[in-house]
Amino acid sequence: MGNIHDAAHLYCIRRGACEDHMGILSEISSRSDPSQKSLQGSQGRRSVMMGSSKLSVSLALALVSSVALAACATIDSTPDAPSVTQNDRVSAARQHPQILQQFGGAVEGPLGTYVSSVGERVARAAGVPGQCTFSVVNTDVVNAFAVPGCYIYITRGLLAIMNSEDELASVLGHEVGHVVADHAARRQNTATLAGLGAIIAGVATGSGEIAQAAGQAGQLYSLNYSRDQEYESDDLGVRYLGATGYNPFAAGDMLRALGVNDELAARTSNRAVNATPTWARTHPMSADRITRANANAQATGATRDNPPENARAYLEAVRGMIYGDDPEQGFVNDRTFAHPGMRIAFEAPSGASLTNTPSAVIVRGQNLQAQFSGGALQGDLNAYAANVMRGVLGQTPAQMGQAQRGTTNGLETVTLPARVQNSQGQVLEVVVTAYRLGDRAYHFVAVAPQGGMGAAASMTRSFRQISEQEATALRARQISLVTVGARDTAQSLANRMAFDTFQLERFLALNGLESATALRVGQIVKLVTYVR
C-alpha cells in the first residue's frame, strides 16, 4: 500500500473525520518511519479499516467553511446530455488501485459481479452505459462514494443493512447521480485540512510535505456534498429506479435504514446520538429527505408493493459476507482491540470508543484522543519514539520531556512526553508510548488537555501479547439467512445473533423491520452468526 499518511488522510476524509485531530495524527505519526506498514496480520493482507461510528470530539480544531444552501431540486431536474469525460475516466483509473488498497481492498467474486451488474443497469438509465465502474470495498464503515470518472465505491458495511436489490440500486443510482450532475466540480467542501502541526497547535504552520500530500488526497476524495446536491442526487436516483423497473420507494426505505443504523451505532459505541453520523458527513441528512424521497416515488405512479422489490436475489448475494471485523484486520470488541495474526491486544479507557482505520486504531474519549499503530523497528526503541514524536509535532514549538524506559507486561517500553499550545493558548499534552516486539515496534500517540493523561496511562499499560489460545478464540462474523417459521419470533431469532448486547435491536435494524411484530412466516431474514 501507499504511505500511511496518505491512507490515513483518505480514510479520515471519507469518514468525515478530518476535523478530528486524531485523524490527522494518523498521518503525522507515520512520518517517523517510511517503512512502517498498516496493521496487517501477514504480508499481502488487506489494510486495516474497521469501526463504523463517529464521535464528536471536544478537542476538534477544524477549519470549516460555511455552505450556502440553494433552492431544492425537483424530480424533473436532470443534467443535460450526461456523460463521463475520458480525462476523468483516465484519472479515476489511475486512482482506483490506491483507493481499493486504502479502503481495505476489493470484495470480488460473485458479490462484486452482482453489484456491478445492478450498477450497470442503473448507469444505462442515467445515460452513461458502459462508462461506470462499481466496486465493493472491504470495510464495515457504512458509506458509498463516487469519484469523477464514474468510479463508484460501496462498502460491505452498507451492503449489510440493505434488504433488497432495489435498495442497492437506490444507493448506486444516488452516487451515479452525483457524477452525471457534476457535483464534484460544483461542490463546496465542508472541511479544510490545515498543516498537520497546525491542527495540534492551532496555528498556520506545519509540515509542508505532508500538507501537500494531504491536499492532493483532499482534492481527489473530499466529496462533502451540499444539501442541494443531495436533493438533486436523491431525485435522480428515484428517476433511475423507476426507469429500471425497481421500486422507487426503496430510496426512502434506504434513507430510513441509514438513520436507524446510526442511532443503533451510537447506542452500542458510546457515541452521542446527536453526533454527526458517518453517512451524513459526506451525504448531509435532513429531516425531510425521507418524506421528500417518498413523495417523489409516489409521483412516479409506483406503490409500496408494485413493482415488488427483489429481496431474494439480494439476500442470496450477501449470504456468507463478512460482517463487522475482517479477521485479517484485527477485531474491535467494545473497548478492546485484538489482532490474532500479530498476537497483540489493548483496552481503551472507560467511556472511550475504538475505530480501526487502514493505518491505525483510533481511540476517542471525552478528553482524550489517541492512535495506535506500528511498523518495522530499525535501531533503538528510543530513536523510534523520538521519530514518531518529531512526525507528530512537525514545526510546532513544543516543550519536550525526558524519555523514560521501562517494561509493560514484559515488553520493552519507551515513553516520551511533550507539551504544546493551541491557538487559544490551551496547553495540550502529547505522549508517545512505544513497545518492542522482536523486529517490530508498536506505539500510541495520545493527546489530552494538561493533566488529562490519566486515562491514557491505563490504556498504554494494557498493551500486551496474547496467547495462541486467545488468538484462536477471536472469531469472525458473517451474514447468514434463515426462513421464518411458525414458531419463530423476532426475539427468538435475535437470540441467535452473534452479539452479547442489543440482540433484538440489531436484528430489527439488520432486516429493516420497524417492530418485532413485522415478521411473516416464510420470510427470509438475515442473522449475524459466527464463521465456523
Image (spheres, helix red, strand yellow):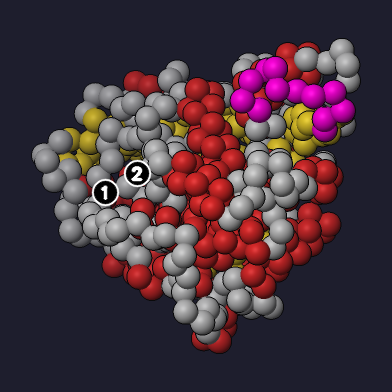
Q: Residue 3 colored magenta?
A: no
Give the main secondary structure of the magenta stretch. loop
Q: Amino acid at mark 1?
A: Ala
State whether residue 310 appears in this view. yes
What distance separates the C-alpha of mark 1 from that of mark 2? 7 Å
Would you identify the image quadrant in which residue 345 lies? top right
**At numbered mark 2, what does the secondary structure look like: helix, strand or loop?**
loop
Amino acid carrying mark 2 in the image? Asp
Q: Which quadrant is home to the N terminus?
A: bottom right
The residue that disc 1 covers is 62
Looking at this rendering, what residue extends furthest in the bottom direction?
86
Residue 20, numbered circle: 2
Q: Is residue 517 magenta?
A: yes
Q: Is residue 428 above or below residue 71?
A: above
Magenta segment range? 513-524
Q: Position of residue 259 (x, y in %)?
A: 50, 35
**Name of the residue lying farthest toward the front:** 301
- Taking depth in this image into account, of 211 and 483 the one nearest to the observer is 483
Tell me: 358 left or right of 387: right
- For the residues labelled 1 and 2, say whether their Cβ atoms are less than 8 Å apart: yes
- Please state the horizontal and vertical placement of residue 251, each as a whole percent of the image: 58, 48
Q: Which one is nearer the viewer's eye here, 148 or 501?
A: 148
Residue at the (35%, 70%) spot, across then down: 186
